[in-house]
Every structure is written in structure tokens, then in C-alpha cells.
Amino acid sequence: MTRDAGQTVLQGVYFDGRSSRDQAATLRVDAQTATLELADGSVPVQRWPAHLLGVEAPVPGVRRAVTLPGGGRFETRDDAGVSAWERATGRNRALSGVRALESRWWAALAALGVSLAALALFVVYGIPAVARQAAFATPRSVLATFDRETINLLQKGEYFGPSRLSAARQARLKAEFRQVAAWAGGGYPYRLLLRDGEPGGPNGLGAKGLGTNAFALPGGTVVMTDQLVALAKSDRELMGVLAHETGHVTSRHGLAGVYQALGLTLVTTVITGDIVSAGTFAAAVPAALLSGGYSRAAETQADQVSGHYMLGTYGTTKPLQTILARLAKDDSDESGGSSKKSGPSIFDLLSTHPGTPDRIAYLKRMEAEGKPAPTR
Amino acid sequence: MTDPAAPPNDAPAPGREVQSSPPGALQPEPAAPGTVTEYPVGFTGTAGEYFRLWIVNIALTFVTLGLYLPWARVRNRQYFYGHTWVDGQNFEYRANPAALLRGYLIVAALFVAYAVSSNFDSTQWVAAALAVMYAAAYPLLVRQSMRFQAVNTVHRGLRFRFHGTVGGAYVAYLLANFVAGISFGLALPWAWSMQRRYQGEGLAYGSARAAFRGDVGPFYLIGLTALGLTIAGGVLIGVPLIALAASLLGNFDLGDIDPTNLASSTPFLAVALTGYIAVLVLYVVAWQYVRGATMAYVLNNMELSGVIRTRATFSPWRLVWISVTNSAARVLTLGLATPWAAVRQNRYVLGGLTVRAIAPLDDFAAGVGGETSAFGEAATELLDIQVGF
């Protein structure tokens, strides 16, 4: 580059845009005018107002290109000269900045950090937030369909069988649940399904049964197994559990979980997508694993709902505490014993094992503070 | 002011050995028939330089919530084009990111509409209509994308063009794929050949039309090789794994076989994982072989206006090896090796490519052909359509 009296002089190649001929040329630019002179003088010197010339954005290591009026191009390796001219005339400010970042290793490292942080933020906060919004935006009719399909699936897969409880006992529990449902509100068509969680007996094919469990589906269907009913020492404990489940319904946790898993699958596919197209299958696995981490906050929220119900109705959260403790003990006894027993099932919305002491502590705190009735 | 008034090809470029082409001639003429000049294609990109460009553009895409994506895509491509050289001149990519952004937004909106409406019974017809529209418009999108890519590729100041017709696109991408489908894949290599022919015959550099001199036979050879590879690999991998799995099963009581138990046994998981990885590797190998061999065959049978041919000397098998090791490197580095892998593959492919000409490269004339919308390009990129050129 040569600069004298505000003039930039660039050596390069000229293409007229009508043929593929390359011609050595000199481009001189000052504040007002640009002149192009061919080395062999075959074409008269061309002159334009400088502002008619375009400069293509810089890319690291790539020859710079100047577009000329009339479709011609001037290409030069004199990056410093073109950059000085760009700066003087304020061209390509943004992309010159990008190029400056691309040329520095510290910027690359910082970009790596920013990318990882952005990805982490998106996975930890972005997806759950979007999933929550999507869950609340989902129409009721869809929720009902979801319930029906899921129950059909569980029935067909023999995850549970018809309840072995007496008709009177079932009617009693359903009547009590109606009170909980009326309290929970939200306009959901709540119904309680009592089912046998070990349809093949405790040690037979029932290994894949739901076992001691209760869970809520998005549309207001709450399933409770005979085994959980048997575990409870009083109906208050069961109503605490069911109130907890209505909390999942009104907060639409189940649906949010589905959307979260979908979002995670999408992100994993976008990241791994180019590696192998078949990767979608592989991508589903970590997505499913990760989404398990979301439910902790949901459990606390549902516990809070149940705590409010119990404080309002019984004046204490004790029954839920005791059945949670018994569930945890039951589980550790079983996993310590025969390995045949079903491991943690995907439907374990209630017993998220490691958190149980925390959850009990939380319920105790709630009782101590004697929180006022929920405002929902 | 004054437009460059001189006619093209007014004088030969100084300092270049030029076979005497008459001044003013628009079409290159073989001055000395049989005199073939070979121009090796070179690639000057480096992994470190590209890594910085790549990661900075990813970060900017994140920070701008994706709005920067078209700029990132264009810069990535500009890097590869700008570092590809033939006879002392590089290629250039000139796509307008703002136009691409519009296309991306439209495609993304349609995709979201499809994803949302397909979830609800009452709106399923919307999803179905969108899917049918997509299937019907697919060849059009491919053609649009080809036009966009061609017209935005510049070499020696001249744009490439794509003249493939709409009818041709429907034959090559709808009819051929349909026939390939109903013939259980028997016609698949024929569909490949139709598609490569459509792409090759439609291409033009300036006003010079390209031609594809290939035949359908070699595509069948490529397809059969890939099929044989898949079957042989499947047997080699599958038989020992199944035997292993069976011996593991033998240790259980027969009454005990149920999915929950099986899935939780560590040896079984190990066997399943090995099998899964082996299938993925086999898939990559077969597919990359098809891609590499097809690319080599097409490049060996392309010619431009009767005076330029390309010759590919890279080996499809070596390309398979590069692809597999690249994939492994990317998985092991959680994607950070992607720029290195891309540069490595490009360097190998372009290093094995020669342009052979019986006329000087600086004697082509500009062609005509309107600008094209970026929608097809946006659609094919976002929806991951394999245009596969």
C-alpha cells in the first residue's frame, strides 16, 4: 500500500465482468475519485466517484475484492491498503469487526466460552421456560387425548392391572379425592384411577409394573396403585399424595416435561446433526437422561401445593412427610434386597429418590411457618 | 462516469502464456488441438484460521439469538471458496446474507407451523397440507438452490449460472425418486444418475455451458459396491455380536427373559452399544463411499463448452477413511474438531482435482440469467435437503 495525500494506491488484478480475463491493474482511491489503470495500458484509464465502488467484506486470508461500476471487479492481496480505505470511509464496519475477532486466538477462546455458556443457559433456562409457556398454551382437548392415549398404552403394556381393592374402598378413596380435586380447581376433569401396580404378582412378569406409585397425567387423570394404598397408614397420607399430583396437573408439569424432552432432542440433533443423520436415535438418549433433572423443581412446586392443601384441611403436613419417608425406606429396602425388583421407573413422578430428605425438610419448614392458604 | 468501454478479450493478459486466440472471439477455440494444459486446484485454508472464524461466528449466532446465522453461513462458505485456487485465481461466494435471512425466517415459520399443527387433531389438516406442499415443491426448491449457489459463485469476475429447467427438476427429483421407491431401490442408482445429470447439464460458467458425459452404468457399480459393503460388513459385525448376545442370554433362566432385566445387564448393554456404533460406522462408510465415488465419477465426466474437463484423482476409499476418522474426531472432541475435519477433507478432495484445458482459462464470456430468490437455498439448508453437489 502506498498512501500519499489521502490517496490509497492498490496493486491487483482487474476483471471487466464480461470475460474471464485477468489483467494486472492499479486502483487509486482518494476521498472523491477512484481511478483504475491497467498495467499494459490496453484500456484507457477509468475514473469513477469513489462512493460508487463497493468493498466486499473481509474474510481471513482471502484476497480482497472491490466491485466497480459496470460489473467490473478489482482483486488485491493488499489487505492493509483496503482496510485503511474501509476505515477512512466507514465501509463494512460490522464485518471488519468480525474479521478482527476471527484473527485473534483470545477472541476464539472467548467465543468458545460464550458459545458454551449460551448453550448451557439455553438448555438450563431457555428450554424449560419455552416448554412451560408451550404447556400452558396447549388446549384442554389435547390434554384429554394425551391422557387417553397414555392410559391405553399402559394398559396394553401391562404396566398395571385392574385394582384388587374392594368396591367400597375404591368408592371411599374416590369420594375423598373429589374434595381434593374441588380444592385444586383449575377446571380440569379430574378423575382417580385405582390400579394394581403389580399385575403379574410381586416377583413374576410384574417386574415391569409400576409398583408402589402414583402419578398424574396432564389432563387431570391421576393414577394410584393398590400398593401405595397398602403402604399408607391413613387416608390423609394418600390425600397428601393426591394433592401433590393435582399440583403437577395445575402447573402442567407433565406436558412441560414432554416439551422439554422434545426441545433437548432438537438441540442435540442440531449439534450432532451433521455428524451422522442416523444420530437422531442416539440423540434421544441423552435428552431423556437430561430431562430427568428438570423434575426436581416441579416436585418442590407440587409439594408446596400439597402442603397448602394439608395445612388448610388437616392443619399439618405430617401425613405427606410420613408416607414420603416410608416410600424412600421401602425403596432402599427393596434395592438392597433382590435385584429383581423394578428399578426407578420413568413414571416415578412421586418418588424422586435422592431428594426425599430435602422434600420432608421443606414440608416441615412449611408447617413451621404456617403459610397462609395458597393464592392460585 | 466512463464505463469500461473496451470490448472483452481485447488483448491477452501480460505475462501469461496464451495460445493465440483471435482478438474478439467470445468462444474459446482450441488453438493447438491436443495441447492440454493442466491446472491443479489448490486449497490454502488452514485449520487454525478456520477454527477461529468458525467459533467466532457460532458465538455471534448465539448472542444474536440466531439472527446472525445467514452471515455466519456465508462467511464460512466464503472462507472455503476464497481459499480455492485455479491458475492463480480464487473462487468467491457472493450470497447476500440479508436475502438468506428472509428465506430462513419464512422456512422457520413454516416449519414451526407444521410442528405445532401436527400435534393437534383439529389442525392436523394444516400439517398435512404443508407436508404435501413440501413434497410437491421439493424439486422446485432444489432447482432454486442450484440457481442460487451457481449465480453466487464467482471466478475470474464471472458468475456461474444454472439453467436446469423446472420440468427437468421434477423428472430428476420427483419422478426418479418415486420410481426408485416403488422399485425397492433397484432404480436408485438410476435416480442418482438422473440427478447428477440434471445438475451437470444445467451448470454454466459465464456463457459456457457444462455437459455431463457420464452414463448410468457406473452409478449401478457404485450402488452395488456400497450394497456389497453393507452386507459383508453387516455379516462380519452382526454374526459375532449375535453369538455373543446369545451366549449372554444362555446364562439366564429361560423364564427370566424379560426386557427390563436384559436391558439392565451390563454385558448386554456393552454388546448393544458395540452393535450400535458398528452400525453407525458401517452406515458412514457405505454412504461416504457412495458420495465420494459419485463425486469422482461426475468430476471425471464433466466438461465445459468442449474445452475444459475436470479430472479427479482422489480415491473414494481414502475419502471414506477421512470421513470416518473425521466423524470420530468430532465426536471425541464434542464437535470442536469440526473445522479441522472440514479443512482436512477439502484439502484432500481439492488436492486431487485438476482442471485440464485445451483453451486458455481467461477466454470465457459472461452469461445472462436473472438473479434468483434465496428461498430455495434457505429451504434446502435449513431442512437439510441433500442437494449433494
Image (cartoon, rainbow, N blue to C red):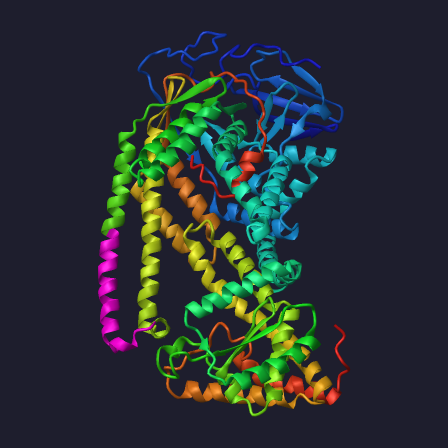
Rendered residue at 70%/69% (across/down): A186
Magenta span: B233-258
A329 vs B107, left or right, is left
Residue B193 higher or lower than A94, as above or below: above
x, y percentage for residue A83?
Answer: 66, 36
Which residue is at the front of the view, B106 or A146? A146
x, y percentage for residue A226?
Answer: 49, 83
Residue B182 higher or lower than A351, as above or below: above
x, y percentage for residue B281?
Answer: 34, 53
Q: Which SS does the magenta portion mostly show?
A: helix
Furthest toward the front, the residue is: A168
Among the 4 quarters of the image, the one containing residue B259 = bottom left
Q: Quadrant of the C terminus of chain B?
A: top left
B348 vs A232, left or right, is left
Q: Quadrant of the N terminus of chain B?
A: top right
x, y percentage for residue B152?
Answer: 55, 29
Q: Is residue A201 visible?
A: yes
How many numbered discs? 0
A244 vs B300, left or right, is right
**Can residue A207 be found in the magenta stretch?**
no
A298 vs A4, left or right, is left
Residue A268 higher or lower than B136, as above or below: below
Which residue is at the front of the view, B385 or A330? A330
